[in-house]
Image (cartoon, rainbow, N blue to C red):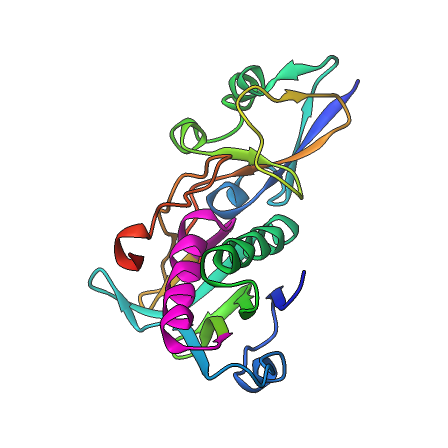
């Protein structure tokens, strides 16, 4: 079965193995649809406030996610 | 990227290492801002902060912020920005922003711009550790794909 790898940061580190979560995914899906799937595994309230990104960019809401891809779930930030 | 040096690092930040990058003889101003972990927050006694970062995207974001600052205040401005990851004890630096420019006005403004943008755009998180043994991830600013370029306009104009 194919999967998408979701990297975890900040308050999401308490989920999965603390580094990433492998979510079964057999076909491309929208970021919106992926969030629905992720809601079964992560804190829903925090997920609603979170963005998604790759190593080079924040993903837009219309992004398509493909099996085998690695993306990061990014809770609200507080650097500095 | 010309005149821009950024790094997300688990190494201790020192002022000395940033000085070598600010070397333009035509510059008469150097501004250094250091963010330091303080010993209390919202009435709780703190003994340290753990910083987590999505390092590749954080590095890219810091570079983008510096480029935007050069666009606003001069392509010749020099930047050195270092941000810590891992545990940072009270009194230690979590962040250093060094800016060099021909005159002080643009250096002050660019430095303030960079720190305010980091707080709302860089994928970096902090977990406070308290003297009572508890710890907590701090609430932050939600990211969006277009950044927050106007977040500091009020203080810069």
Looking at the image, which residue is at 66% across and 64% down?
B2
Q: Quadrant of residue B91?
A: bottom left
Looking at the image, which residue is at 61% across and 56% down?
B59
Q: Main secondary structure of the magenta part?
A: helix
Could you say where residue A68 lies in the image, as x and y percent from the top left? Answer: 77, 27
Please tell me whether residue B115 belongs to the stretch shown in magenta: yes
- State whether residue B9 is above or below residue A28: below
With B24 as the anchor, is B125 left or right in this view? Answer: left
Looking at the image, which residue is at 53% across and 17% down?
A32
Tell me the quarter of the image containing the N terminus of chain B. Answer: bottom right
Range shown magenta:
B100-126
Could you say where residue A47 lies in the image, as x and y percent from the top left? Answer: 45, 30
- Is residue B36 in sight in this rendering? no
Could you say where residue B40 lies in the image, as x and y percent from the top left? Answer: 27, 69
- Is residue A69 in sight in this rendering? yes
Q: Quadrant of residue B19?
A: bottom right
Residue closest to the eye, A48 or B28: B28
- State whether residue A52 is above or below residue A36: below
Please tell me whether residue B88 belongs to the stretch shown in magenta: no
| Residue sitting at the far left | B43
Could you say where residue A74 lies in the image, as x and y percent from the top left? Answer: 52, 39
- The mark tally for this picture is 0
Tell me the quarter of the image containing the C terminus of chain B. Answer: bottom left
């Amino acid at each position: 079965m194919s999967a998408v790898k979701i990297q975890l940061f900040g308050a999401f580190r308490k989920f999965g193995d603390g580094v990433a979560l492998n979510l079964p995914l057999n076909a491309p899906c929208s970021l919106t649809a992926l969030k629905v799937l992720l809601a079964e595994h992560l804190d829903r309230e925090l997920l609603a406030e979170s963005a998604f990104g790759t190593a080079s960019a924040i993903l837009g809401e219309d992004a398509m996610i493909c099996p085998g891809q690695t993306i990061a779930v990014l809770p609200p930030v507080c650097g500095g | 990227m010309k005149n821009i040096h950024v790094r997300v690092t688990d190494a201790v930040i020192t002022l000395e290492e940033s000085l070598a990058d600010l070397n333009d003889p035509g510059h008469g101003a150097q501004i250094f801002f250091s963010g330091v972990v303080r010993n209390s927050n919202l009435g709780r006694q703190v003994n340290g902060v753990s910083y987590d970062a999505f390092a590749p995207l954080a590095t890219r974001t810091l570079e983008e912020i510096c480029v935007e600052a050069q666009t606003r205040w001069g392509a010749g401005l020099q930047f050195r920005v270092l941000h810590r990851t891992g545990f940072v004890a009270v009194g230690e630096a979590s962040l250093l922003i060094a800016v060099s420019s021909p005159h002080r006005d643009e250096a002050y403004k660019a430095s303030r711009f960079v720190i305010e943008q980091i707080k709302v755009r860089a994928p970096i998180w902090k977990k406070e550790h308290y003297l009572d043994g508890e710890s907590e991830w701090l609430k932050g600013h939600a990211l969006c794909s277009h950044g927050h370029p106007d977040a500091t306009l009020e203080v810069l104009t």
